Amino acid sequence: MEPLFAELEALMSSEIYGRVVSVQGLLVEVAGPVHEMSVGAVLAVESGESGPPVPAEVVGFRDGRALCMPFAGLEGVRMGCRAVLAARESLAHPCDGWLGRVVNAMGEPIDGRGPLPIGGAARRLRSTPPPASERGRVGPPLDLGIRALNTFVTCCEGQRMGIFAGSGVGKSVLMSMIARNMAADVAVIGLIGERGREVQEFIEDDLGEEGLARSVVVVATSDESVLMRRQAAYLSMTVAEHFRDSGKNVMCMMDSVTRFAMAQREIGLSIGEPPTSKGYTPTVFTELPRLLERAGPGKGGVGTITGLFTVLVEGDNHNEPVADAVRGILDGHIVMERAIAERGRYPAINVLKSVSRTMPRCVPEEALPALRRAKALMATYSDMEELIRLGAYRRGSDPTVDEAILRHDALETFLGQGKGERTSLDEGYRSLANLLEMTLA
């Protein structure tokens, strides 16, 4: 009954409104019955005689006024315009009928396929993560269909992983390969601050009909307001929670968490928060764990949300503030490097720098010797790479280096994978063992 009570409470028994008294950039100040407004409440700000009202969210208070950020442009908003209280908080009504659909941050369809079905229960967009004491443990290994990830960075059901890469290194393509090939029941894909040109290409070419049929895609392009970009992340997680609570194993992919952090930074700076490292405000580092901790196993082990969150590292600096904060929250990280992409190996994953915190517990015992041997050979080659390329290493000086050189090309081929290929967990282990001329016990 809790969702029903929440909806009844959100209904306005009488019209409550204030007046616009100031507009500075993206910040709208509203005077009036601010005691009736709360942080997270939604106002409908009138925008002239003929224009539709502009939805805005209350993000704070100052000097007896409500500070609001708009979900759309402020063209036509004048001093004295009414700001009507429309809802106490943002709610969504997801249901299984959303599968195969593309929606915006407000939960409205943008795929031209008619209205969305409305779920029976309302869900708060900014819900709290499940209590740690009531959560189940991560499940068995999840087949992502990507050789490099399945073998060297194995992910479990309910685990949260970050994909760290600079721009143009292949994060979105890797994400689409996972969406098509994974063994989860449902995929919820949040495109946060994505380029408008790439959205349709991602849905039609990368995701395809088969991938879209079991997915819900939430889109907020880079030209939309900061609130739309932030809310798209919250809606993605809310939809994933709906399917998790239905007992399904959900893959929630978000591209990218960095743009969510940037949107939160703009909101914080607009309302006067002090900037810290690289201009990020304190609320950025408060909101990141609140968002990311919502992924994971459900209560009592019923359903899981496996999270894959891309992190755009600025200037290929993997230690910038957002990357550093996210790495400390998640259960592992996948590092993609420009140098690997430049030499033509895709996906450009550096398996030596990538870590899954559920390994080696989730890997079959018989596969561990091959994995350790392969990593040792790749690490040896990486250490000696400069000498090898310069011709300063003499073959026969070190048997381990000789083997690393011998296996290098084969390992590089193993780690590479085309967009249309798929490799299961067992196939990956067997292929790696055959490559190293080892046998699985």
Image (spheres, grey):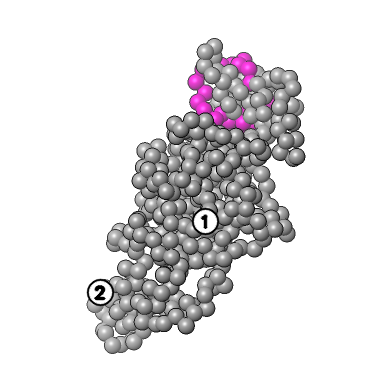
**Where, quadrant-wise, is the N terminus in this rendering?**
top right
The kind of secondary structure element at disc 1 is loop
Mark found first going from the N terminus, 1 or 2:
1
Residue range of the region highlighted in magenta in the rendering: 57-83
Task: Give amino acid for label 2.
Answer: Leu
Crowding at dot 2, Cα within 10 Å, few <14 / some 14-19 / many 20+, comes out as few
Q: Is residue 77 magenta?
A: yes
Q: Are marks 1 and 2 in contact (CB under 8 Å)?
A: no
Give the alpha-carbon distance from disc 1 to disc 2, as whole Å: 46 Å
The disc label shown at residue 184, or none: 1
Q: Is residue 79 magenta?
A: yes
Looking at the image, residue 41 sits to the left or right of residue 337; the answer is: right
The disc label shown at residue 390, or none: 2
Question: As rendered, which of 125 and 377 lies closer to the eye?
Answer: 125
Snapshot quadrant of residue 140: bottom right
Task: Give amino acid for label 1.
Answer: Ala
Question: As rendered, which of 214 and 377 lies closer to the eye?
Answer: 214
Q: Is residue 76 visible?
A: yes
Snapshot quadrant of residue 89: top right
Considering only vertical position in the picture, is 195 above or below 140? Answer: above
- Residue at the (49%, 46%) spot, across then down: 215
